[in-house]
Structures are given as structure tokens and as C-alpha cells.
Image: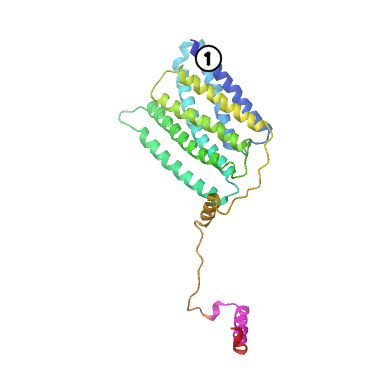
Amino acid sequence: MKSQLVIDMISLGECLACALALLVLLLRNQFRSYLSLSLFLTTRLVSDLVMAAIMMRLQTDHAAYKTFYPVYFYVYWISYALEAVLLLMAVHGIYRLAMAPLQGLQRLGMLVFRWAAAVSLAVTLGLAFGPHITASRFIVRFVAQLQQTSSILTLCLLLFVCFAIRPMGLSYRSRIFGASLGLGMLATTNLVVSAWIASGRQLYSVVNIGNGIAICAAFCVWGVYFAIPEPKRRMIILPTTSPFLRWNQISQALGDEPGYVAIAGVPPEMFADAEIEVMKRASRKMVEYPEMA
């Protein structure tokens, strides 16, 4: 009973922190800049409110269990899957903002990220299938595996973003770092909770209490970082030996069409009249003044 009361209080605090973070994003005109993050918060807030209303109804009317429990089940797991996708999209957007000065690395990283996400989705779908599996069990396994995969990809990309914060002219007070910090906290807790849920543990447990506290902390981090003024991005000065600069140059060259050089067999009609006239004059000068050759 005590665990249930604690989780109910944490759930209330989570809704308040989520609404506050979303409100700060709107007031600071950052909703469009961090669109995926804003949609993540919106999805989380709506699903929490809907599930809280269903739980209150079930506590007062036990006869409505058969009617409302399927609604609760699908709202929970559909929102859980949407949050996993939006989490990846949010990290993708943060990476794009962080690496904006280095277009080559930005393009290469986004390409690798998309391929990794596509392969991970295919693997997740394959692992969710099994013999004699029901539709509800398939949803649970698929979404839990999707959340685990999303969390791993998120942590990998965030690790690179954190290492690139200082070289990219950002500080640890920037909103990009604050958003990354909150996403890292969520990804870590989701990685643990998704494995816990898939094993069929009880709802009111220590893991869920810790998960709720971590989620509230992540929302508070976002609210604080987006509420305080963001320091201006510094001018980026990289040494010529910097690996960021080298890899950016290599990435920019990838996919470009190679240059072509005419060796022989070039007919005169391929040149413009002005080019032919210039070559004639140059030839006459070489004949008249051989010392210039």
C-alpha cells in the first residue's frame, strides 16, 4: 500500500514536471526548434493523464475492469512505443543542432544513424515474433525491445554529442547539453525498465519508483535549462590537426562527383570561339618569343 501511494505521488509530480517543461518550451519559443522533444513531452503528458483517469475509474468502479483495462493496456503500450520513436528523433535533432558548424560530419553521422535505426527496427521486429504468441504478448515484447534498442542508440549518439560539446563552441549551460542530459537520463532508466517490464514484474516495485523519480528529474532538468538564458555559441577554432576537422573534410568529399581531365582526342568544336582565339595568340607568342616558352 505504501509503494502504491509513493508511485501515485510520483506520477502526479511527473505530470506537473512534464507540463512545466512543456510550458517553458512554449514560452521560450523553442517548441519548433526542439520539435521532437516537445512532441515527446506532449505524448507523455496526454498518456499520463488518460491513464490516471482510467486508474481512478477502476479504483472506484471495479465492475468496469473488463471495459477499461484494454483501453489502459493499449494507451500505455502505444504511447510507450511513440515515446521510443520520439526519443530517437529528439536525439537526431540534437545531434543536427550540435554538429551544425561541421556540415560534413553532420551529414555522415545522420546517414549512419538512419541506417543503424533501420537495422535495429528490423532486428526488434524479428525478435518480437515467437511460437504460440498472442497479440497482446507480441505488443509487449515488440515495444519493450523497441524501447531497449532506442535507448541504446540514444546513449551511443549522446555520448558522441557530449564529447563534441566543447569543440563545437557549446558550453555545459547550453540548451543542447541540457536536452542531451535529460535524454540520457531517460534512456538509461528506459533501458532498465523495459527489461523489467518484459519479465512481467509487478507494477508497484522499487524499480518503478526509481523510474518515476528519474523521469521527474529529467523533466526538471529540461525545465531549468530552457528557462535560464542560454550562453552564446563561441566561435569555433580548430587546429589543423583536429580529428573533427579532418573527418569533416573527408565527409564533405564523400559522394562528390570526381573531376575529369581531357587527355587526347579533343575536337576543336568543343571549345568556344574565345578559347580558340586565346590559344592561337598564345601559340603565336611562343613562336615569336621562344624565350618565353
> Which segment is the magenta one?
268-286
Q: Amino acid at mark 1?
A: Val
Residue placed furthest toward the bottom: 288
Identify the residue at image location x=59%, y=42%.
Answer: 166
Prevalent SS, magenta region: helix
In which quarter of the view is residue 21 placed?
top right
Element under disc 1: helix
| Depth order, front residue of 145/166 | 166
Identify the residue at image location x=57%, y=50%.
Answer: 103
Residue 97 point in image, percent of width and height: 59, 43
Mark 1 Cα-neighbour bin, 10 Å: few <14, some 14–19, many ≥20: some
Identify the residue at image location x=55%, y=37%.
Answer: 90
In the picture shown, does residue 234 fall above or below 252?
above
| Depth order, front residue of 106/64 | 106
Relative to 206, 101 lies left or right:
right
Relative to 16, 118 lies left or right:
left
Identify the residue at image location x=51%, y=38%.
Answer: 159
Residue 45 belongs to magenta span: no
Residue 193 point in image, percent of width and height: 45, 25
| Depth order, front residue of 249/196 | 249
Q: How many numbered marks, from 0 up? A: 1
Quadrant occupied by the C terminus: bottom right
In which quarter of the view is residue 116 placed?
top left
Which residue position holds label 1? 6
In the picture shown, does residue 154 fall above or below 248?
above
Residue 38 point in image, percent of width and height: 59, 33
Residue placed furthest toward the left: 131
Residue 148 point in image, percent of width and height: 44, 32
